[in-house]
Image (tube, rainbow, N blue to C red):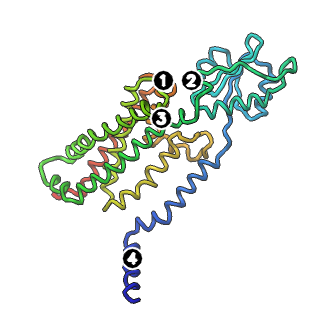
Amino acid sequence: MSRVAALVLRIFRQFLHDKRTLALMFVAPLVILTLMSLVFDGDPYEPSLLVVDAPTSVTERLEVAGAAVATAVAAEAAKALAAGEVDAALSFAGGSPRVTLEGSDPSKSRAALLLIGEALGGAGASGASFSPEVEYVYGSASSVPFDWFGPVLIGVFAFFFVFLIAGIAFLRERTGGTLERLLVSPLRRGEIVLGYVLGFGVFTLLQAGLIAWFAVDILDMVLVGSFGYVLLITALLALAALTLGVFLSTYAANEFQMIQFIPIVIVPQIFFCGLFPLETIHPALRWISHVIPLTYGADALREVMVRGGGWSDIAVDVSALVGFAFVFMAANALALRKYRKT
């Protein structure tokens, strides 16, 4: 019994000496549960609608039903739908009702159609049931939710696995003594970081290409735009994950501590990258989506794969991913100072 007690005491001391593990064990579940509560228990989604040539009574009924409604002329409505700024436009031009759906997110399209039907059903001028003509800017009536989630999941899986593998691989370079030998060589810290990024980057790019090809050609995921752009975005997203994983690995003493970064770095990105409607998330937390690379990768992948966007539509997202990669590389070069012995 005394031997068991000694073993228990050793484990207690081990945990008490590893403050990071102890804090993560008790705090991380509470933080993630809080985030999930704020993400999934937010405000109900209110479709945004434009009405064209509609009677005032129609606009009032839509507002009472819970829609965010604005009036516009036909050209303004078409422009807003193409830019994804509204979910649907309801037009009475020519006397007959017509609903034009933005269509890239099937759940939002269904919400808009349901709200319009509930607000105006049986309210036609003749008293007949409301049955508007429906058309789509993107997608179609046969679109399914996975068409909207799929491009984001490509980014999530590419980011997660590259982050984890790159972080652990770089950690082993350090714990194995390879990095220490490089640091006493004439190589500069920036050159060491660049060398590791290029070395790991070859396999990262191969993995990103494989994920994109498998999703599109084997799983038959929707692709309206260029496959080349999909490859470019996935590769840049993987590069950002690679540089972030290498950077954070400098603060981990072993593989166990590297894995502890997952609930802190990866999980919030999944919640706030756009996989779930940001409009329903608590307003105080929406800023998080602007400071994580996965948001820009997911947005660009959706723009190309769902809406068929070109370079001008993804240039900002691509620039942001490149910027994240350079920032993480620079931060890593600075972090290596504590390992260089002069």
What is the residue that sits farthest to the top in this orientation? 94
What is the quadrant of residue 200 in the picture?
top left
Return the x and y of residue 327 as percentages of the image width and height: 34, 42
Instruction: Judge by depth and name the residue closer to the eye, 163 or 216.
Output: 216
Specify few, some or many for label 1: CA neighbours under 10 Å numbering under 14, 14-19, or 20 or more: some
Q: Can residue 80 be seen here? A: no
Label 3 residue SS:
helix
Image check: 323 left or right of 90? left
Residue highlighted by disc 3: 151
Looking at marks 4 and 1 on the same chain, the residue that comes earlier in the sequence is marked by 4
Residue highlighted by disc 2: 138
Residue highlighted by disc 1: 224
The answer to whether the residues at label 2 and label 1 have Cβ atoms under 8 Å apart is yes
Q: Amino acid at mark 1?
A: Val
Q: Amino acid at mark 3?
A: Pro
Q: Residue at x 62, y 14 (%)?
A: 75
